[in-house]
Amino acid sequence: MKYSVTALFLLAILGLAGVEVSAQKKPLDHSVYDSWQSVKSSMMSADGQVLVYAVGPQQGDGSVFVENLRTGAAIEVGRALKYSFPQDGKFVFCTVNPPYAVTRQAKIDKKKADEMPADTLVVINTATMSEVCRIGGAKASKSGYDSAPYVFVSQSVKGRKSNNLLIVPTDGSQIDTLRNISEYAVSKEGDRLCVVTAREEKDSLSKRSVVLYNLGGGSPVTLHEGAEEYAALRFDYSSSRLAFLVTDQKEKTDGTPAFSLYVSDSQGCRKLVDAEDESLPKGWIISRHSKLSFSNASSRILLSLNEKFPPKDTTVVDFEAPQLDIWNYDAQILPPMYKASERKRSLSATVPLCPDGKLRVLSLNPDDHIQYPVGAEASFALSMDEGPYVRQNLFAAEDKSDVSVVDLTTGHRTLLAEALEGHVYVSPYGKYLMWFDSSDCNWICISLGSGERVNLTGKTGVPFFDTEDDHPSPKMPVAQPQWVGEDEAVLLCDEFDVWKFSPDGRSAVNLTGGKGRSSEVVFRPVDFVPRSNPLLYSSIFTYPEKGPVELSAFCRKDSRNGFGSVDVKRPSRFSYELSGKSFSSVRRAPQGATLSFAMGDFRNPMDLYVSTTGKMKDARKLTSINPQQADYRWGDVQLVHWNAYDGTPLKGLLYVPEDLDTAASYPMMVYFYEKNSETLYSYRSPAPSRSIINIPMFVSNGYVVFVPDVVYTPGHPGESAYNCICSGAEAMCRQFPFIDRSRMAIQGQSWGGYQTAYLVTRTDMFAAAGAGAPVGNMTSAYGGIRWESGNSRITQYEYGQSRIGKSLWDEGGLDLYIENSPVFFAPNVRTPVLIMHNDNDGAVPWYQGIEFFMSLRRLGKPAWLLEYNNEAHNLSQRRNAKDLSIRLQQFFDHYLKGAPEPAWMKYGIPSERKGNYFGYEYPESSR
């Protein structure tokens, strides 16, 4: 006998419904959130022998677990979630927090900051799995990147801005204390320490100084002393050089202090660039904010320059001075952009570390972005100068820039491309430049040796962009270039498959053999080895010229996930596997085969696994989080299909209670945001809502939840939502008779909130609707500001998510903006609406939710607006998220389950009782 996918799905559910234990399970409630656990993080030593991971609840005390995978020895450090360790993994440093209950009580008692319970640093020896020591009052700690003969612990000193610095030997020997330290840096091997000592506040003769300690032996060396300020201590990768900044200027009298650049090496400590160096452009200085780094092999220092501003005019009295921002129509940067990012305009510069090395400024202007290939060891830099196009870039779908190569010795510029759209990539060894040409959607490669320019992908006959992308903007590549050998070949991805190209365009090999396209499996090269090194300008990575390249795999047809590999030299050695699981945090040891990863699905939490052979099939499960889930009613999910009203085939997800009775009738929540069918196998924790419904919570409480994919026609995003979402809701009612068509609701946030607002003006098929941060009026939102970034919202409407495709003044443009604005059709609304829009929303202006609410209020439509004070686009404060979760459930329970109307819906909350009374109860009558 053959069954359809839907039939098999229902049989599985029915099988569960007959199990007696299922009937005894409890529905999830809002009290479960705090205890629900997750694997917060995991890390491996370079050789893969030591694995460290943290497990913690959403609120409360967690633990760090350290395991020696070679010996099997392990240790748990309670009340800890943060940890660090050097590459050799011989020691682990865990920050142990005070008990959550103790910290909570201290907040209740309104303790001052220096009276709050302090953290403790615990040092673990991974060979013996024993504690070396515990250091109380730890503010922060550092160790060497490669190894840690010492850990350096900063401790606050009451009444002082500076700290004590403890030098803690990891062999358990005596701890030393350095007092009055304001800044410090540690070498790669962890045996050299440089500190800035602060002045003793009660000693007028004390001086600030920069002191270098060679902890392996030798006396400390004072590199500089007596300056007004020191900044930006930086060791190079070899630990043989140290750079820092020095100034004698004071901001009060001199304006922005100008710093000199010093370097200390085997030749002693010397000034490399003077604060008044003649090479500095007028009005630009080395400041305390200048970014400072060595090139990978220390052939040069890279730094940024900042603008110098004069001291404040002391004759201006604050209470008499006007307070205003001036917005210039032709300015490159407007005040909101400065405020949002605390933007500091900068120029890029280099200083060669040779006897006659001179400062060379590379940027033509603050919008001339400089990239340094080969770990900044190449003879040139790449310039992407947006300066001539800054204003038009603010309103363009793609940024334009002039691309040039800059000789680091002479400063000579060679222009390669003018007004180029998109991003330019430099090959790891600096031999080639690549960019995706949006005019014909092909990858272009240019040889920096010969200047030859080649279209690599034009003859392949397949698109190297996402053909399903429905934005009215230039197509974008699906992945960045990945390189093989010393720029011998480049890996590029079409929509499905992975290709290897010779940079001269003479050969092109489909490494995955077209199997991605034929089976609708998306393959992408992945590198699971962590490569961030804070002491290098950049970590150079390429795939070997022969041997396997690891791949991620995702099947578009059924949303299964998996991995594979292909040999770069012998593509016939290609294999992959797909699984009905989701994966995250996949990491491979840099110097070994060990692999760790998190794996789960909707019914199983994301537990941590480890494989010392490097093969997932050999993995051992390390965690078993959330055993309490077995006590609660959960659910099941399946992939569903239907055709939109216009015939477009669509996919979505349908979640149902695990004890589903197909003879009963269930209310259905419909949640949406673009496309979500790819998350079929994702685990979803019961958690307080930051903005949207929590699917496990609603399913556990007897709801069916439908999550449809939405595809868009440019110019008509609202009608596109109707075409996909409403057709899907009707299709679910036809396919699954246990869904009650009269008890359906919709809910979405941001772009989903906009679609919710539009849909209730278009149909009355839903019994209730929840709109989070909705755009109610595209004509007024069009000219607004995204306050979190300070950027204009205009491009978002023309080319971005709103997909209008025209400006407000283009022919037919105004009609489209009105067509897609719910406020103009508010008289059509017959659905009760719950709106959440917060007064510190930096993405969608708060007034948009108000416009929609006030329109409904004026027309006498049932509507509520939740405004969380000082909250952003999505709630950040847990207390508010818990509150929203309760109100969402009460609102939908009232309209879909016939539950009583809670007091907050019926009467509101008087301002006098705000913060003390919440109105959750169900009164007959109450005030």
Image (tube, rainbow, N blue to C red):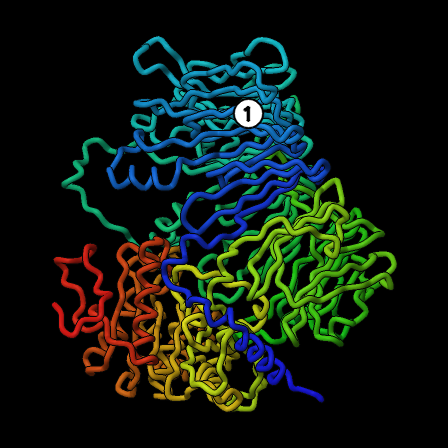
Residue closest to the eye, 729 or 49? 49
Residue 671 in view: yes
- How many other residues sit within 10 Å of disc 1, few (<14), some (14-19) or many (≥20)? many
Residue 464 x, y percent position in the rendering:
68, 69
Q: Please identify the quarter of the rendering in which residue 917 is found.
A: bottom left
Residue 197 x, y percent position in the rendering:
43, 18
For this view, does 607 lie left or right of residue 808?
A: right
Residue 236 in view: no
- Residue 817, placed above or below residue 346: below
Identify the residue at horizontal 30%, vertical 23% (top origin). 159
Residue closest to the eye, 871 or 456? 871
Identify the residue at horizontal 76%, vertical 64% (top origin). 576
For this view, does 116 lie left or right of residue 238?
A: left
Q: Please identify the quarter of the rendering in which residue 564 is found.
A: bottom right
Residue 764 x, y percent position in the rendering:
34, 88
Which quadrant, please, contains the N terminus? bottom right
Residue, disc 1: 151
Residue 227 x, y percent position in the rendering:
42, 18
Residue closest to the eye, 308 or 519? 519
Total marks in image: 1
Which quadrant, please, contains the C terminus? bottom left
Residue extending furthest toward the front: 20
Residue type at mark 1: give it.
Answer: Val
Identify the residue at horizontal 31%, vertical 16% (top origin). 201
- Residue 886, placed above or below residue 107: below
- Residue 466, placed above or below residue 122: below
Q: Please identify the quarter of the rendering in which residue 925 is found.
A: bottom left
Indicate the secondary structure of the residue bearing disc 1: strand
